[in-house]
Amino acid sequence: MKGRFYIVGVGPGDPELLTLKAVRLLQRCPVWLTPKAKKAGAGTALSIVQGVVPSGDKEILTHYFPMKKIHADRRPAPDVEEAWQKAAVLVIDRLNSGKDVVFPTLGDPSIYSTGFYVCQTLFDIDPEIHVEIVPGVSSMEASAAAAGLPLCLGDDRMVVIPAIFENGYLREMLLTFDTVVLMKVHRVMDRLVPLLVELDLLKNAVLVERSSQEKQRIYRDLAALSEKEMHYFSTVIVRRS
């Protein structure tokens, strides 16, 4: 009997934010496929789960996934696609031997997660593979909680977008929605801050760096950050009211 593949959200950093279901599956599954953004060292997702679940008896497959832009209308870079393929092979090998495999992913699997690319690659190889998606606390939820902000109230409209889009698109979103959550802002502060100034929204913006982690920082004066490259785990929330 083939094993089952689980994509499990482990939250943004604080191990106590793991759901009971995530902990149970991590305890039960004999194989962990853990992503990392750098070739050297272990990944953040692994360090989060090891804060709660002992891993001494697990087969841990630490796999490198290049952090490059992925566009919906074109194929990914060859090394990105190759990483998905290699990960799928590792998973299928264990599933075929009857072992369940869990893929712990930062935040929630449904929001910009590598796990879904691996999942689709698996289905391309074997459409009969059993997959279960387990939600987790997202970085935007943790950031809003840390900043003491609601994401939506009443009839508010909210949009979540990666800040790497060019300014014309960002401008449209900032003028249209009540709440704008900007992900992946770590390298675009030099153009994001002037845009917020131009739209008179700088006072409505807050940046949370490394939400729920030990080094969490909350910035309410984004003007001081325009020349600073923030940590990769940084989120900006802009509320018009």
Image: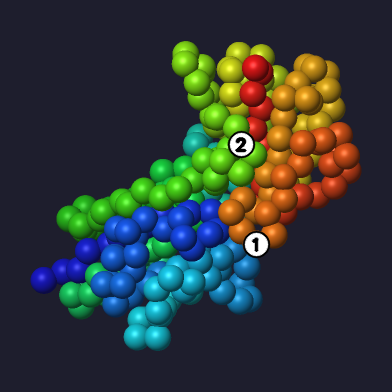
Q: Residues within 10 Å of mark 1 (few under 14, many from 20)?
A: few
Q: Is residue 217 left or right of residue 227?
A: left
Gap in angstroms between the C-alphas marked 2 and 1: 18 Å
- Where does residue 12 sit, x and y in percent of width and height? 53, 54
Residue linked to disc 1: 214
Identify the image quadrant of the C terminus.
top right
Q: Nearer the viewer, residue 2 or 141?
A: 141
Q: Quadrant of residue 231?
A: bottom right
Q: Nearer the viewer, residue 90 or 32?
A: 32
Residue in view at x 20 percent, y 57 percent: 130
- Compare marks 2 and 1 and give the one earlier in the sequence: 2
Residue in view at x 84 percent, y 27 percent: 194
- Where does residue 31 sit, x and y in percent of width and height? 33, 75
Q: Quadrant of residue 29?
A: bottom left
Q: Amino acid at mark 2?
A: Gly
Q: Amino acid at mark 1?
A: Glu
Number of the label disc, if any, that sits on residue 148: 2
Identify the image quadrant of the N terminus.
bottom left
- Where does residue 238 sit, x and y in percent of width and height? 66, 27
Q: Name the residue at the bottom extreme.
A: 56
Q: Tag count in the figure?
A: 2
Q: Residues within 10 Å of mark 2 (few under 14, many from 20)?
A: few
Up-down relation of residue 54 to residue 132 (above or below): below
Residue in view at x 25 percent, y 55 percent: 131
Residue in view at x 61 percent, y 44 percent: 146
Say what secondary structure mark 2 lies in.
Answer: loop
